[in-house]
Image (tube, rainbow, N blue to C red):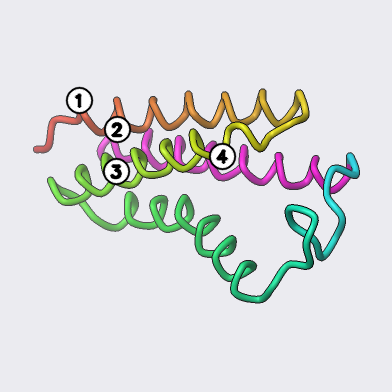
Amino acid sequence: MERAKTILTGLWAALMFTYLLGDVLRVYSGDVKPGELFGQKASQPLYLGIAAFMFIPILMMILNLLLGGNILRWFNLIVTLLMFLLNLVGLPSYQSWYDAFLIFLSLVVNVLIFWQAYVWKIT
């Protein structure tokens, strides 16, 4: 497997675990109540949207392992840019220090993914 694909797969895994760590810490710290989001009872469509969002890094890991070529490079560039922008929009909603730290780290990982895909020389 190409080195770039291995690095991209690892970076997407790091991003997924950063998101997951934030979710786990929010529950354990008491910052969220189970069954509620943003102070309101969470709905099934909202949970489905969250699940779809959280599946994106997993999907990108799978695609980086299975696909190749220029289309994979563009997938990485576009998807990581969208993830970066979504995290940037959500930044003000993170109140805790650990959340701010983790969202900062996720933005850094997004930049690393974008850079790795950008400089990737397709053979």
Q: Give the numbered dot on residue 119.
A: 1
Residues 38 and 80: in front is 38
Which amino acid, mark 4? Gly
User: Does residue 52 sit above or below 103 in this rendering?
Assistant: below
Task: Give the SS element for disc 2.
Answer: helix
Please state the horizontal and vertical placement of residue 3, each as a whole percent of the image.
Answer: 29, 33
Q: Is residue 46 above or below residue 97?
A: below
Amino acid at pointer 3: Asn
Q: Quadrant of residue 62?
A: bottom left
Quadrant where the N terminus is found in the figure: top left
What residue is drawn where x is 66% and y is 76%?
44
Inter-mark Cα distance, 3 to 1: 12 Å
Q: Secondary structure at mark 3?
A: helix
Label 1 near label 4: C-beta < 8 Å? no
Residue at x 66%, y 46% (from the top left corner): 20
- Stretch of the chain drawn in magenta: 1-28
Residue 90 tag number:
4
Q: SS at mark 1? A: helix
Give the alpha-carbon distance from disc 2 to disc 3, as whole Å: 15 Å
How many angstroms separate mark 2 from mark 1 (CA)?
Answer: 12 Å
Q: Position of residue 42 (x, y in %)?
A: 73, 67
Quadrant of the rendered image containing residue 26: top right
Q: Which residue is mark 2?
A: 3
Q: In front of the other: label 2 or label 3?
A: 3
